[in-house]
Amino acid sequence: MGRIRVLSDVVANKIAAGEVVERPASVVKELLENSLDAGSTRIRIETEAGGRRLIRITDNGCGMLRDDALLAFERHATSKLSDVKDLLSIATLGFRGEALPSIASVSRLTLETRSPDETTGTLVEIAGGKILRCEEAALAMGTVITVRDLFFNVPARKKFLRSEQTELAHIAQLATHYSLAYPDKAFELRHQNSELLHVTPVSIMRDRVFQVFGSQIVSELVEMPEVSREIKIDEVDEKDTRFFRLRGFVSRPQIQKSNRNSIYLFVNGRLIRDRLLMHALSAAYANLIPPSSFPFALLFLDCSPEEVDVNVHPSKTEVRFRRSSFVHDFVRDGIREVLMASRPVSSLPLAQPPAQAGAGLPYSEFSQRMEDHRYREHVPAAPVEGGPAAALPEFRLDPPAVPAVSGRLDFSNAPPLAENAVPPPTPPPKLRNVPDTHGPLPPGLMSEPATSLEALRDLRPIGQLHDSFIIAAGNDGLWIVDQHVAHERILFEKVLTAMAAGEVEKQQLLIPIMLELSAPQQVEFARISAELEMAGFEIEPFGPRTLAVKAAPADVSTAEVEKVVFEILEIAEQEMRRESFEDIRRNMAASIACRAAIKINTPLDLPRMQWMLDRLAETQFPMSCPHGRPIALRYPTREILRGFHRI
Ligand code: ADP
Ligand code: MG
């Protein structure tokens, strides 16, 4: 007697119905889950053309008996539950008996399967839901399901599929996720001739994380010791308890991701997206990372099956907890505790401490930064002179003709500045001549984000505030310019223009930088490698999941190269749903610009400030940084005059 039964209408109707097959990745998900439910320990996924042309999953699980092989394609035929009350405590990944018939109705599917209880296997061939063949075959134990030409008979669906790389990225993400949830099983993912993932069974979670993400990520994560709680739901019946267990890995707060793609949540081994758990995670990181950032997290929550309803969403990616606020707090506190134990506070990447006066930013470091931005050829190195007082640039309303920081850097012997020539100081503007085109400010507001482009051309730096903001005199008032975002804007436009013209300046790295990529990152890399090249990177594959970065955009310092590449891959992942490379290109330029721009807490001398203001004036959009932050604030002359009761 077979193991598969067709569910009665009563049960079938209670199942969250809906479309199971949305895209190639949903086929992979269903087939993977079936293989896992079948107790397989080795699962291989092969794909072609992003899964549209071919998806083949080979497992070594329990296989299907001959009678079951055909029955599996009936709607609501499953070996996993039989009764309505089973729905209340589902322990398998599948339970609806919908996947195989759905997939078979929109593709050309071949099933080859043999159970250890039978000596021969069964081959079933179905196309567009019609059974073409069903015969005995000599097969190895386990199951092979081959899905070809997905949506061949549903052109409308096919039209909505994204590019091959995008579909493949989704598949890679899925395979990665499941390989993390089942470290004791072997997973292999191939796309045409390339191997994207190949992990052998390991006994501890950390080893699997290492296999999938590489050593860098492992070192950034904190492993959570398992936390568990039992609750008695019946005071009388001692045995009627429910358990909750949480384990996994979370990133130290220094690691901040710009999207949720590095958050992996599993409930009873099932990969899910869940708002409640997501919220618990952010609550655990509250005040440790900025609200717009996300951690890396790999969380496994296991609980009594009765405590979680998995039957709420057609693709089984959402769950509902019976005790939601308990679960929320349990998860939040569990994570918070490990974060506290790993003492994140001292290592928090708060703003760099302001450079101390005098001791200040060591000159070597300062000049190194300058070198990174290619000021060096114009500035001969000079030792820092004097003690604390001497190093403090004075803020003076009437700036001296010589740079205020000339005590530190001697420009007298400097070669003439070629492209970045410093113009002779312009005479202070005459207050009387200054028209205030901006009208009065709202009461109480002293400065406003600057909006006028024209005025920028006449800015004359006076000094620096906190080594971070350039104070400048303009025809229309006093300006405060954020040096980091200003430089970011300058570089952003420069990079974009150079990319468009194919004239990006590169630097060859003396020693190539090796990067280890996860499977989804490899797919992303393949998708955007031409864009990366346009931006000035030379990156070559080096071993199965390692890349060697041989050259990088000239503006990016070597220390930042790795971060920029990963940031760009992350951006690409985020933009995955969109096909246009335009956004990726802009974001890529923004990322390069941000990493290359001088930081705050960097002392600048007047010529450099002037250089910055001049370049800023030449940009197309000098008023906000690529991320939308304002670059300059203006204190209009009219307000100054009013403040001194002169008008
Ligand atoms: P469900 O997983 O919800 O039961 P499916 O349509 O995905 O429904 O699969 C139907 C049945 O086919 C399963 O219940 C299982 O008995 C059998 N089956 C599917 N895939 C496999 C596999 N890889 N190995 C063994 N049995 C399988
Ligand atoms: Mg299934």
Image: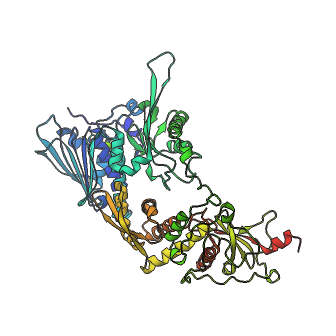
Q: Nearer the viewer, residue 245 or 272?
A: 245
Q: Quadrant of ligand 1?
A: top left
- Residue at the top extreme of this rendering: 236
Whole-percent x, y for residue 131 in the image = 21, 51
State the image coordinates of residue 418 (x, y, percent, origin top left): 54, 84
Which residue is at the front of the view, 110 or 497?
Answer: 497
Whether residue 450 sits left or right of residue 216 in the image: it is right
Query: Left or right: 605 with respect to 250?
Result: right
Q: Residue at x 51, y 17 (%)?
A: 235
* Side of 519 where 572 appears, left or right: right
Q: Position of residue 32 (x, y in %)?
A: 30, 46
Quarter-of-image position of residue 209? top left
Residue located at (33% from left, 38% from top)? 204
Q: Quadrant of the C terminus?
A: bottom right
The answer to whether residue 68 is seen in the rendering is: yes
Colour scheme employed for the rendering of this structure: rainbow
Residue drawn at the location 56% of the way across and 67% of the way down:
598
In percent of width and height, residue 213 lies at 36, 50
Give the quarter of the image for residue 127: bottom left
Q: Which image quadrant is residue 529 in?
A: bottom left
